[in-house]
Amino acid sequence: MRRSNTVRIIAGKETRAKLIALGKAYVNCWNEVNTLRLEQYKRHELVDFDKTEKIVYEKYNAALHGANVEQVARNTV
């Protein structure tokens, strides 16, 4: 099973840098929400999706804008 897609970006240097930064922000957001939920699970707590979504939303809202953060946080189930 393939776990990632590789995309070749054909753009100017400035646009390419912005897209790469945006992609890294998505990856960090995805990893953080999963880590928070895994920690709750390992502590034998109920996984609070709303709480983890709120934590990640507040941290990444400026970089990814609200709707995008919500989509990442809600699709990690």
Image (spheres, grey):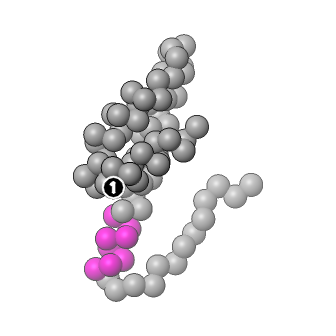
Residue 24 vertical placement versus 66 (above, below) = below
The verdict on residue 18 being magenta is yes
Residue 44's spot in the image, x, y percent?
54, 13
Range covered by the magenta-colored residues: 14-21
Residue 9 vertical placement versus 65 (above, below) = below
Residue 14's spot in the image, x, y percent?
28, 80
The residue under the point 51% across, 14% down is 45
Mark 1 Cα shell of 10 Å, populated few (<14), some (14-19), many (≥20):
some
The residue under the point 42% across, 45% down is 70
**Total number of numbered discs in the rendering:** 1
**Taking the image as drawn, is residue 31 in sight?**
no
The verdict on residue 40 being magenta is no
- The foreground one among 71 and 45 is 71
Left or right for 59, reference 28: left
- The foreground one among 33 and 75 is 75
Residue 37's spot in the image, x, y percent?
49, 29
Q: Which residue is mark 1?
A: 64
Q: Considering the whole magenta stretch, tell me its main secondary structure.
A: helix
Quadrant where the image shows the C terminus? top right
Q: Residue furthest left?
A: 62
Quadrant where the image shows the N terminus? bottom right
Q: Residue furthest front?
A: 67
Residue 29 vertical placement versus 54 (above, below) = below
Q: Residue furthest right?
A: 1
**Taking the image as drawn, is residue 73 in sight?**
yes
What's the residue type where badge 1 is placed? Leu
The residue under the point 34% across, 64% down is 21
- The foreground one among 50 and 28 is 50
Tag 1 secondary structure: helix
Residue 73's spot in the image, x, y percent?
46, 42
Q: Quadrant of residue 23?
A: bottom left
